[in-house]
Amino acid sequence: MAPKMKKPAKGGHGPKGPMPKNTKATFSRLLGYLGRSKAMLLLVFIFVAFSALAGIIGTSFVKTITDDFLLPIIGSEITKELLAPLVRTLVSLGLIYIFGVISSYAYSRIMLQVAHKTLNTIRADLFNHMMDLPIKFFDTHTHGELMSRYTNDADVLRECISQSFVQLVSSTVTVVGTFIMMLYYSPVLTLFVVAMLFIAFFVIKVLGKQSAKYFRAQQKCVGEVNGYIEEYIEGLKVVKVFCHEDAANNGFGSINANLRNAATNAHTYASILMPIMGNMSYITYAATATIGSLLIMTVPEENFFGISVGALFTFLIYTRQFFQPITQISQQFNNIIAALAGAERIFEIIDTPAEEDEGYVTLVNAKKLDSGEIVECEERTGIWAWKHPHSDGTLTYTEWQGDVRFHDVTFSYDGKKTVLKNVSLYARPGEKIAFVGSTGAGKTTITNLINRFYDVDEGKITYDGINIKKIKKSELRRSMAMVLQDTHLFTGTVRDNIAYGRLDATDEEIVAAAKLANADSFITRLPDGYDTMITGDGANLSQGQRQLLAIARAAVADPPVLILDEATSSIDTRTERLIEKGMDKLMEGRTVFVIAHRLSTVRNSNAIMVLENGEIIERGDHNDLIAQEGKYYQLYTGQFELD
């Protein structure tokens, strides 16, 4: 019995669970991903600087045009000598702005490529790491919440990289360049503008801190909503069968309200920043114009405090340019915080410890032995080998035989509730071992431990005489195949799905496996036979047909150990009889573990284990257990039913 999947949190308005802890570290890590495109980023920064400087330099022409051309023209006759320099100045101004436009277009296109390249790398790292995570991780996280990392969090991050980061750099260059020009034209007015700027920064700091908190909460709530929706879409038939619509709606309403509250608070603070900064810029502009006008009227231009009309016009434009990028920075600040919250959620998965594998035993230069029973195993220079009864007594590498033994195994999923208690059993090569018992008795847990989806707490499991913790997980799992009650087919052809059991299988081997599972007859009747496309987890096939393909997938893997977890529970009795012979062929010569509710499928097992509350209460073959007249006898004769 696997641990229950976490349900979305209900109630409350703030984030629940782990919160982003280190924004600086996340930002630094994100820069590391961006740093993989150093050459492109260098071009972006150059073009951003050109674009910003074009605007700054272009503004400086206002003083020249006003003081050197417009004011002298007033009340005077326009002459060719006066007009020619003005035209040259206007042409130069036009060329500067055209250069700025080209630079803006260039950095936008390049940054878009950088953003998609970076997100491609992050998604690849996320997916690759997910493949290395233990099964326990997926048992305790909803699929929708995980998908949110690939969609919502990644999209917010992409938008930030392609727009906000560039805007941040552009605004910074503009602010610095404008500040230098403002100092050049009027140090006095510049000091006044800087004083107003400090007030604006204080407002940004206070509001930004609150906004960041709610943006992080919003990203988490989006993941919870996605998880809830994904869960109920998958179980929609169950919802309708049990008329659970109202309860489902109420549950969604609760977590949707959490998202609404977090999003409302986040965007409320974000939207407040813009008008506050805008009004601050208007107040500063009006005050600067007033002070500058007084200086023009009362202080000569030659004086340190003096300023010309053209210089005042230019300074006023610079004042707007100075506050505009700061306003943009305050606006982008919230987008950056939201993106960093998403990035931290992505990195949280990437930083989750991968499935540990301390195993080192593998089959090196394996070759099949026609005969010989395993006598013992010895360790030679860190590599395991099996001794066979040959005359020379040499150690020879061989393929796995399929000897599986439990030695007083105790296990708990959460460290609190014991699921298996001191379980001991053995399955010799070629034997069929069946497990029967009530739901939650520990049947599936045993199979999860055999292939090391989970590791035992106490005791040990040996495989061909070797503790499975010493066997490399990939090697162990490659020697086993599972057919589960819940089949899963991938998008692709029927041929591809069968070959999933062994990717290098030939067409002949795929067809042979399908015939072994008695799937060939229905496959050949499909529109394109083995090349028929499967989509939506096999929605165009019946449940029985999907199960037959899963059995064929196990057959093509040709493993020494086979695990059947309610493999025929979704197949009708007629189809079950149809594949019975094929299953017998599939199980022939293999160690087989069977979990079944239909006792007719386990009658011919070498040993049947009856489990109750994590303990084996009865064991033996069918005849032995019938003779005992215990729990199995009650089940078989219908005196007791499995739940």
Image (spheres, rainbow, N blue to C red):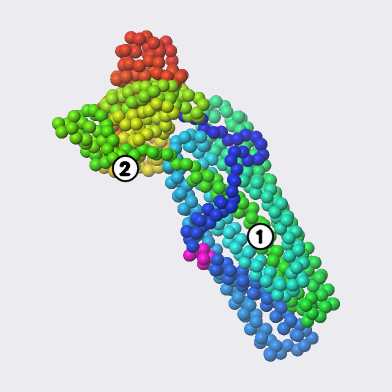
Q: What residue type is labelled 2?
A: Leu
Numbered circle sitting on residue 503: 2
What range is drawn magenta here? 39-44
Q: Horizontally, is 226 left or right of 595 in the view?
A: right
Say what secondary structure mark 1 lies in. Answer: helix
Q: Quadrant of residue 14?
A: top right
Magenta stretch secondary structure, dominant: helix
Name the amino acid type tagged 1.
Answer: Gln
The structure residue drawn at horizontal position 68% and vertical position 86%, both measured from the top left corner, is 83
Q: Residue furthest right?
A: 298
Vertical position of residue 105 compared to residue 299: above or below: above
Would you call the spot at circle 1 few (<14 residues within 10 Å), some (14-19), or many (20 or more)? some
Q: Which label belongs to residue 65?
A: none
> Quick one: 315 or 90, which is closer to the camera?
315
Residue 136 highlighted magenta (yes or no): no
In the shown orientation, is residue 300 left or right of residue 58? right
Residue 328 numbered mark, or none: 1
